[in-house]
Amino acid sequence: MGFGNLKSDCGLSALNTYLEDKSYIEGLPGVKKPIAEYGGAQAAAAADDDSDDGDDDIDFFGSDDEEELAEQKRIKEERLKQYAEKKAKKPGPIAKSNIILDVKPWDDETDMKEIERKVRTVATDGLLWGASKLVPLAYGIQKLQISCVVEDDKVSTDFLEEEITAFEDLVQSVDIAAFNKV
């Protein structure tokens, strides 16, 4: 069904006549005020054309006060700054490594229990000794395989090697058998 030109009075009256008995227009809760109160479609279009944006005084989202907006912005920036400071003070995760060292003696007559006791005397912040075992090497010689957990920032493998090889009368060499990040 056609209504003609809806911008003309004839087209609008044909549309109004058609819609008078339609409940989906009249029965809606939001459409209870009569058209006369609002004016027709042409009146609304004319009001839009003639308006000088008089709705500038209406604030749909709260206060339009410049001081309030500046205060809210200042509070937001202050909270973000406090959050960033708090986040910066919080220490990150501590990087740790699990290291298995092979400690080799000079000969088969070296006391391996004494080597283990001496190795465990190496102590520093960030170093924790773990399990150890004797592993056959060759010709009856055994090596000490000992594990430790170190904090990467505090203890280096070079430090461990230097400290253990300092027991020159017992230890020939130290090798890293395994190095895993924890």
Image (cartoon, rainbow, N blue to C red):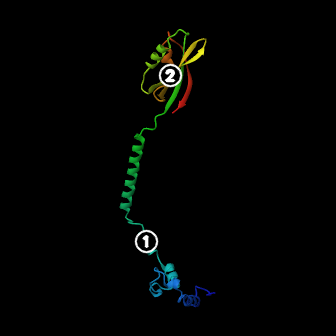
In the rendered structure, find residue 132 and report the number of the disc placed on it: 2
Dot 2 amino acid type: Ser
Task: Tell me where residue 9 sits by quadrant.
Answer: bottom right
Relative vertical location of residue 142 with respect to residue 26 in this rendering, above or below? above
Task: Label 2: state its secondary structure.
Answer: strand
Quadrant of the image containing the N terminus: bottom right
Q: Which amino acid type is shown beneath numbered disc 1?
A: Asp
- For the point 56% across and 26% down, which residue is it? 178
Instruction: Identify the residue position indicated by label 1 in the image.
Output: 56
Q: Residue at x 53, y 89 (%)?
A: 21
The image quadrant that residue 138 belongs to is top right
Instruction: Compare residues 60 and 64 and report the one nearer the observer.
Output: 60
Counting from the top left corner in percent of width and height, residue 43 is at 50, 84
Q: What SS does tag 1 mark? A: helix
Q: Nearer the viewer, residue 136 or 39?
A: 136
Q: In front here: 161 or 136?
A: 136
